[in-house]
Image: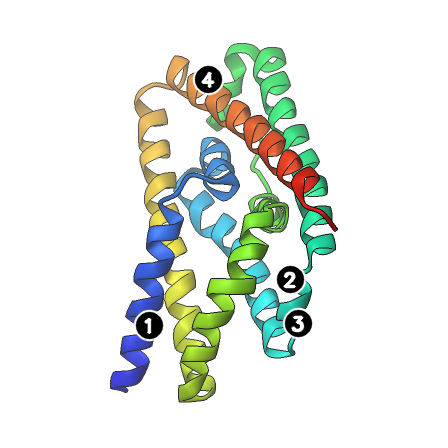
Amino acid sequence: MLGFLAVFWMSFLIGFSGALVPGPVLTATIKEAGRQGTRAGPLVVLGHGIAEIGITVALILGLSSFLTDLTVRRTVAMVGGGFLGWMGLSMLYRLKSAGPDLTQRNQQPPQKHTAPILLGISTTLSNPYWFGWWGTIGATLLVASSSLGYMGIVAFMTGHISSDLAWYTIVSYVVSLGLSYNRGTWYKVTFAICGGFLIAAGVVFFRYGMSLNA
């Protein structure tokens, strides 16, 4: 039990420090919080967690070398960069075309829960650094936790996903709280910043992919 808790908290703290770094998943959470409120965080993390469980299974099956292959990383970086750039541009276009009604969340029809879940998956898989992290640091931590058997792996994944859940729930709550006080300029500025960030991230990812020699 002591070993389980040690792996859990180690994974939680490492994962939390990573979650604090701004990235596509954070931007997706802020974006969806304008539609879904506080529940956006857990729903985006659910999608993110599905991707993380999938890559964990892949590593257990011995695919770590595949994740660090230059051709794979180049493809993911370029395709993912293009996807993030498109997503950012669509956010800025929607901001301009929607006008003041963009922030009237209560007047919009209920949003499907699947939207932020799929967004969590897509923004995760479009990030080449996520693959790089799991192919190196993640694989190392997975091997270390597996010394306790499958319970060690469960502790590792539980701690890792719990850190994301805690942080992005806080983020979506704060964003939702801010919207309840100011649904106009504040949300539009935040929405525009997120769109710009995704475009910048897309350019960085695409250039990173171009720099890799397959």
Contact? badges 2 and 4 (CB < 8 Å): no
**Which residue is the site of mark 1?**
8
Q: How far apart are the alpha carbons under marks 2 and 1?
A: 24 Å
The amino acid beneath tag 2 is: Leu
The reply to whether residue 47 is in sight is no
- Using a 10 Å C-alpha cutoff, classify the residue at mark 1 as few (fewer than 14 neighbours), some (14 to 19) or many (20 or more): many
Quadrant occupied by the N terminus: bottom left
The amino acid beneath tag 4 is: Lys
**Which residue is the site of mark 3?**
63
* Residue shown at the point (49%, 27%) measured from the top left: 194
User: Circle 1 — which element?
Assistant: helix
Q: Position of residue 93 (x, y in %)?
A: 63, 17
Nearest the eye: 113 or 48: 48
**Which residue is the site of mark 2?**
67
Above or below residue 129? Residue 203 is above
Q: How far apart are the alpha carbons under marks 1 and 4?
A: 38 Å
**Which residue is the site of mark 4?**
188
The reply to whether residue 89 is in sight is yes
- Using a 10 Å C-alpha cutoff, classify the residue at mark 3 as few (fewer than 14 neighbours), some (14 to 19) or many (20 or more): some
Above or below residue 19? Residue 30 is above
The numbered mark, 2 or 4, whose residue comes first in the sequence reads 2
User: Circle 4 — which element?
Assistant: helix
The amino acid beneath tag 1 is: Phe
Contact? badges 3 and 2 (CB < 8 Å): yes
User: Circle 2 — which element?
Assistant: helix
The numbered mark, 1 or 3, whose residue comes first in the sequence reads 1
Q: Position of residue 178 (x, y in %)?
A: 32, 27
Contact? badges 4 and 3 (CB < 8 Å): no
